[in-house]
Image (cartoon, coloured by chain):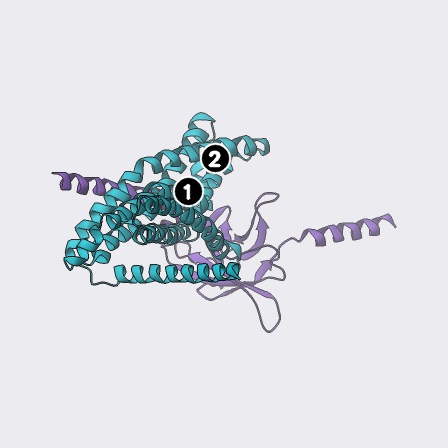
Chain colours: A cyan, B purple
Amino acid sequence: MSFLQQVGANTIARIAAVGRAGLMLSGALFAAPKLKNVSLTVRQVYVVGVQSLLIIVVSGLFIGMVMALQGYTILVDYGAEGSLGPMVSLSLLRELGPVVTALLFAGRAGSALTAEIGLMKATEQLSSLEMMAVDPLRRVVAPRFWAGIISMPSLALIFSAVGILGGHLVGVDWLGVDSGSYWSIMQSTVEWQKDVMNGVIKSLVFALVVTWIAIFKGYDSIPTSEGISKATTETVVFSSLAVLGLDFVLTALMFGIE
Amino acid sequence: MNKYKTELMVGVFVVLTIGAILLLALKVANQTMSSAGDTYSLYAKFDNIGGLKVRSAVKVGGVTIGRVSDIHLDKDDYTPVVTLNISTDYEGFPDTSSVSILTSGLLGEQYVGFQPGFSFDGVEDLKNGDYLQDTKSALVLEDLIGQFLFNRGGSDD
């Protein structure tokens, strides 16, 4: 009986948490925007986006290089090394760009967001803001949320672009694939709407999910040191799982059925 | 000064993003240029379209002049009707032109081969909405093998 009770209590607690997350999001988004908050958002784009730039560029470069190297050794057996360009660019634009960026973003920026907001809560900065009649949702949550939504698709685009250049570096400059065929077969295969835009839509969805989870976990954390550490871990785990699961659903919707 | 530095770095971030978009648009996808042009539609009825798909290329001598925009079945005589969207850069093909469904390479994808006909007096140009009369269907491997076996059987007698 007590087991059943626990299952029920857990379920109710989870559903209530989802409800709190929805309320937090709507409170942050549908509050009347203030001009002052724009500069707060720019500040957060710096923290969330610009400071993630290094890890995104470096991993994009290496992932592109590795894919070119792996793809070349297989494709050259069939004399099809000209298809290296489409292989690298399609896998980056459709899958690896949005997904790996979202995973890195969850680890690099999401955990930081959770820890920051969690510590604000633990040190009662959020309550102090409320005491001063400043809505913490508008002042603290909304700029971080918008910064995540702006930064992550941008980072994913940079990731894909750098990865394609990295593939060019290894494939063309090192292994000797013809530069013309690398680009021209890529151009005839990659479609703006189907490949690039669907990748952008994917990364927008991932940005929403990752930023939402990160901010909510911080906002909803138990205000102790253990609570914040648990919230930070949960942010990375939950958002990674959500990204990978959603990626399958989105891929099935976008590319699954012709 | 610190705030200025933040804004500068965010500016660099935005510039990098725009650079990535430009690279993807112009160098990787190359779609913005070609799809922007005006097109006109021609229709062609085939007996069998094989593996032709929407967005397959329409080529004259290997040069892509348009794409297949729609494939549907005619409700009256149940034959496939293929809509070809041809760029207005290439207008004025004569009415005697023919189309056939070809395959690029041994295992490549199928495309529509457009063969401009001879133009002499009394032959009109193809205009938007016209039907191409002279069409050759896709080669279906099974039919070909069947024909081959049939012919062999005949010559042995």
Q: How many marks?
A: 2
- Of A116 and A211, nearer the camera is A116
Q: Secondary structure at mark 1?
A: helix
Q: Is residue A193 above or below residue A93?
A: below
Q: Are marks 2 and 1 on the same chain?
A: yes
Marks 2 and 1, how far apart at CA:
14 Å
- Residue at the outermost left position: B1
In the rendered image, which residue does mark 2 sit on?
Answer: A67
Q: Assess whether mark 1 and mark 2 are in contact (beta carbons under 8 angstroms).
A: no
Name the amino acid, label 2.
Answer: Met
Foreground pick, B6 / B120: B6
- Residue flagged by tag 1: what amino acid is it? Val
Q: Is residue A43 left or right of residue B93?
A: left
Q: Callout 2: 10 Å neighbours few (<14), some, many (20+)?
A: many
Q: Is residue B54 left or right of residue A44?
A: right
Query: Is residue B144 visible from the viewing direction of this image?
Result: yes
Outermost residue on the right side: it is B157
Residue drawn at x 36%, y 52% as measured from the top left: A213
Position above or below: A180 against A204:
above
Please tell me in which quadrant of the rendered image residue B138 appears.
bottom right
Q: Seen in the image, is B99 located left or right of residue A121?
A: right
- Please tell me which residue lies in front, A79 or B94: A79
Q: Position of residue A56 (x, y in %)?
A: 35, 38
Q: Residue at x 44, y 65 (%)?
A: B128
Residue A100: mark: 1
- Number of other residues with Cα within 10 Å of mark 1, as a class: few under 14, some 14 to 19, many 20 or more: many
| Residue B57 at x, y percent in the picture | 50, 52
**Which label sits in the foreground, 2 or 1?**
1
